[in-house]
Amino acid sequence: MKTNDKRLRGRTGRSDGNESGIKCVFCGTSTTEVPAAESARVRCDVREFGNEIFTVWRCAACGSLHTLEPIDVDRYYGYYPATRVRYDLYDFFVTFSLRKRMQILKNTGLKSSKTLLDYGCGSGHFVRYARERGVQAEGYDPYSEEFGDASVLDHTYDFVTVQDVLEHVDDPHALVNDLKNYVAPGGRMAIGTPNADAIDLHHPLDQVGPLHQPYHRHIPSAVQLQRMASEGGWQVVEFRKDSYVDTRMPFVNSAFEFRYSKSAGGYLPLWDPPGSQVHHVLTHPSLIFWGLFGSFFSRETEMVIVVHAPAWH
């Protein structure tokens, strides 16, 4: 669907200082050269900012997605739910997602003798999980009190993981290049991020899921993610359209998660106290079906890539 939003012809996603419209941060195409393929107005799915609406547009050249409006980063991340989750409250269910994420890394060479950096680790769930299994894991997240020590970035690691971070930054390409500096020669980097190719801007489940406004600033297409990750002689070891939250464990799948959020008013309530979550499911019986069988109905709106660093890196 074509867009008639005039703001897409005069604002900057990445600007060169001229009246050149908005540039896709992935392929560099300007909306004055190739008009945006489509756009949608999407409400913030975090309760504190639930009355705020943002414009998301799709690059017609590469299919990647972008948020039009700039944001005050400190204001929005000061209330970010993921950084306030207590680990012990969610051990049972969270473990299944962490197990799947760990298995992807093990399939590409991670062993207990290896070192690992989880960049943008949030509350540190995966760091703790990896340590419990013998991996020498460190975490870094500037918005985490526990993992905000930047000195961990003074070293290189056998594995660097960045899950649900790439889409949050204003310059994803610069982030990927920066992360490569933390990978030891011959090491590997794993990036997990939403997949723009599978996201419907106008679908209510995608709006409370992978679009996650205004936090998801730029979402790459599969081609653009592979291009960025493999630059400089890096080799793609694995690429999959999959999410670590999609497991066969009942109630640990994205289909259930997104429908839960939609039924709760379009917000992200899965970080609410467990008691209120159970009550909500019992008062919305259809969620029981999605909790039990949702893993068979994934929209494949996420993707994971693992790349191998050159020996001379």
Image (tube, grey):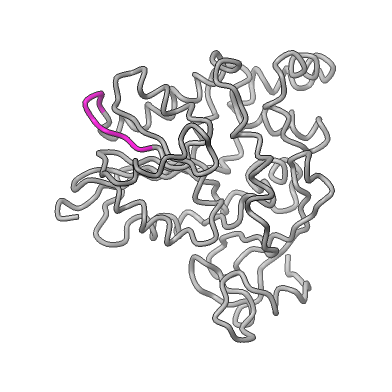
Q: Is residue 96 above or below residue 75?
A: above
Q: Quadrant of residue 223?
A: bottom left
Q: Quadrant of residue 38?
A: bottom right
Residue in the foreground of this view, choosing between 309 and 247: 309
Q: Is residue 139 above or below residue 20?
A: above
Q: Residue at x 36, y 58 (%)?
A: 177
Where does residue 119 sit, x and y in percent of width and height?
42, 42
In this picture, residue 273 sits left or right of residue 87: right
Q: Residue at x 49, y 19 (%)?
A: 95
Where does residue 9 sit, x and y in percent of width and height?
70, 78
Where does residue 85 sit, x and y in percent of width and height?
61, 26
Q: Quadrant of residue 109?
A: top left
Q: Is residue 171 above or below residue 146?
A: below
Where does residue 72 sit, x and y in percent of width and height?
67, 57
Find the magenta span and give its range: 111-117
Residue 115 belongs to magenta span: yes
Which quadrant does the N terminus fall into? bottom right
- Labels in figure, total: 0
Residue in the foreground of this view, choosing between 164 and 58: 164
Residue in the foreground of this view, choosing between 232 and 112: 112
In this picture, residue 12 sits left or right of residue 234: right
Q: Residue at x 75, y 59 (%)?
A: 40
Residue 179 belongs to magenta span: no
The residue lying furthest to the bottom in this view is 18
Which quadrant does the C terminus fall into? bottom left
Q: Residue at x 65, y 39 (%)?
A: 80
In this picture, residue 90 sits left or right of residue 114: right
